[in-house]
């Protein structure tokens, strides 16, 4: 069997740190195991695999049976590539979030798409809480001031607040969104809200004291902090755009660790520059790796703060890498043995969506 994996180069870090499993060098820890069974395991990095019609990705996809990708440095599997991938049966996302695969094309071509559901949801939820705090407390400019050798406290405190008594809302209250709400509970926020077409079970909503708001404009107009925790699909691409940003509370904070393309890049940068948003933080970008001149790298609010952007890593802690590497292995084991897969991992089954999280159909 030919298995193709698109990971990313870890270079020196991957040589020094074997727990960096998501790298080309460490091959999700699968190399010796797959080799011992005589499978052909081709591992490549984003750059050599992605670019051009004669790239390795295009060459190997033609007869690969399994494709493994990570959302962190995704190999985009387009409908056009599905047409070429005549032998492809299974796509495995090492992590959570399979929007880099044309899921409708996977349905049409009867290629299954599986994720390692839950593998990094705590990692992301922790990052969300950290990002909310660093924006609300104006942390980044305070640290930059210290590095510069300055000490002008009032320049920081003029835009620094407590999270206590603020209204925080999540768009998407699935595994990550719910864990964010759980982690926010001890902060004594004024209210915790959620917007999701799938309502939380009553007991779960009660446990985190979360109120559901069914209209998105209503929802954002009530929040001091909005966090985005839904997948990217037809219904969420560009969801946070110029029009919706007008309905945000003036000076709200926005945290997005879900997918960059859920937010309109330029609309966010403008809202931050005008002060409509006080801050924007996250680790996901509409293009990854983000170009050097991407406006989100340097955008600022009128007080020269409010930017908490980092590269896509919130779901790729070493703890998370161990979990998603193990999860990929067990998906492959099931596939090879013809055993049923864990239902929660199946995004696209044979010719149909098996999850309700990638849009209402
Ligand atoms: P999940 O499937 O448990 O929950 C997603 C929730 O979003 C579901 O409750 C679903 O009903 C809701 N949803 C879908 N469309 C919506 C819409 N239009 N409006 C409101 N809610 C909507 O997924 P999980 O594990 O919570 O992950 C969510 C997303 O987070 C992933 O799809 C991925 O894009 C992103 N993610 C990012 C990571 C990172 O490293 N930055 C790592 C892991 C996930």
Image (spheres, rainbow, N blue to C red):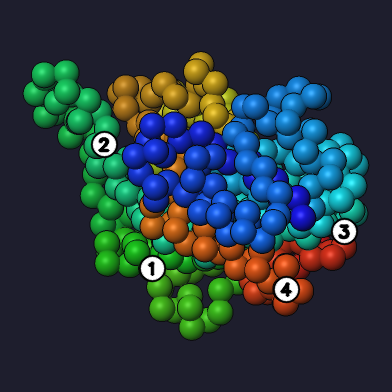
Query: In the figure, is residue 233 to the left or right of 241?
Result: right
Give yes or no for contact between labels 3 and 1 (Cβ–Cβ under 8 Å).
no
Please give the residue where the numbered disc 4 appears in the rendered image: 337
Can I make out residue 146 in this image? yes
Quadrant, the C terminus: bottom right
Near mark 1 (Cα within 10 A), the count class, few <14, some 14-19 or many ≥20, is some
From the image, tell me which residue sits under label 1: 182
Q: Nearer the viewer, mark 3 or mark 4?
A: 4
Q: Are marks 4 and 1 in contact (CB under 8 Å)?
A: no
State which mark lies toward you, 4 or 1.
4
Q: Is residue 92 left or right of residue 65?
A: left
Q: Of the residues under marks 3 and 2, which one precedes in the sequence? A: 3
Residue at (89, 53) in percent of width and height: 109
First in sequence: mark 2 vs mark 1: 2
> Local crowd at mark 3 within 10 Å, few (<14), some, or many (≥20)?
some
Q: Nearer the viewer, residue 346 or 51?
A: 51
Label ID, residue 110 = 3
Spatial separation of the CA atoms under disc 3 and disc 1:
38 Å
Residue 138 is marked as 2
Whole-number angstrom distance, CA of label 2 to CA of label 1: 23 Å
Sequence-wise, which precedes: disc 2 or disc 4? 2
């Amino acid at each position: 069997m030919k298995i193709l994996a698109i990971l990313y180069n870890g270079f020196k870090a991957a040589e020094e740190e074997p727990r960096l499993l998501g790298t080309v060098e460490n091959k999700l820890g699968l190399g010796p195991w797959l080799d011992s069974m005589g499978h052909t395991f081709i591992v490549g990095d984003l750059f050599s695999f992605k670019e051009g019609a004669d790239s390795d990705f295009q060459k190997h996809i033609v007869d690969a049976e399994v494709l493994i990708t990570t959302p962190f440095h995704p190999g985009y599997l387009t409908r056009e590539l599905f047409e070429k991938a005549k032998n492809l049966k299974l796509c495995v996302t090492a992590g959570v979030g399979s929007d880099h695969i044309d899921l409708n094309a996977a349905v049409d071509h009867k290629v299954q798409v599986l994720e390692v559901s839950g593998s990094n949801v705590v990692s992301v939820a922790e990052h969300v809480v950290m990002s909310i705090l660093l924006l609300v407390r104006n942390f980044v400019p305070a640290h930059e001031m210290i590095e510069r050798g300055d000490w002008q406290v009032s320049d920081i405190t003029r835009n620094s607040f407590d999270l206590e008594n603020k209204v925080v809302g999540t768009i998407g209250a699935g595994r990550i969104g719910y864990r964010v709400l759980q982690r926010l509970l001890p902060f004594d926020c004024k209210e915790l809200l959620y917007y999701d077409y799938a309502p939380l079970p009553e007991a779960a909503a009660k446990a985190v004291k979360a109120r559901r708001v069914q209209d998105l404009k209503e929802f954002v107009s009530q929040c001091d902090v909005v966090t985005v925790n839904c997948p990217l699909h037809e219904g969420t691409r560009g969801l946070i755009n110029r029009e919706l940003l007008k309905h945000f509370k003036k000076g709200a904070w926005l945290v997005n660790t879900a997918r960059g393309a859920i937010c309109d890049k330029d609309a966010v940068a403008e809202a931050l520059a005008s002060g409509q948003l006080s801050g924007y933080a996250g680790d996901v970008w509409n293009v990854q790796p983000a170009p050097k001149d991407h406006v989100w790298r340097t955008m600022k609010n009128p007080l020269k703060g409010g930017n908490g952007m980092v590269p896509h890593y919130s779901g790729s802690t070493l703890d998370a890498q161990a979990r998603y590497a193990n999860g990929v292995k067990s998906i492959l084991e099931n596939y090879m043995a013809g055993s049923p897969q864990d239902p929660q991992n199946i995004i696209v089954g044979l010719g149909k969506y098996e999850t309700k999280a990638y849009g209402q159909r």
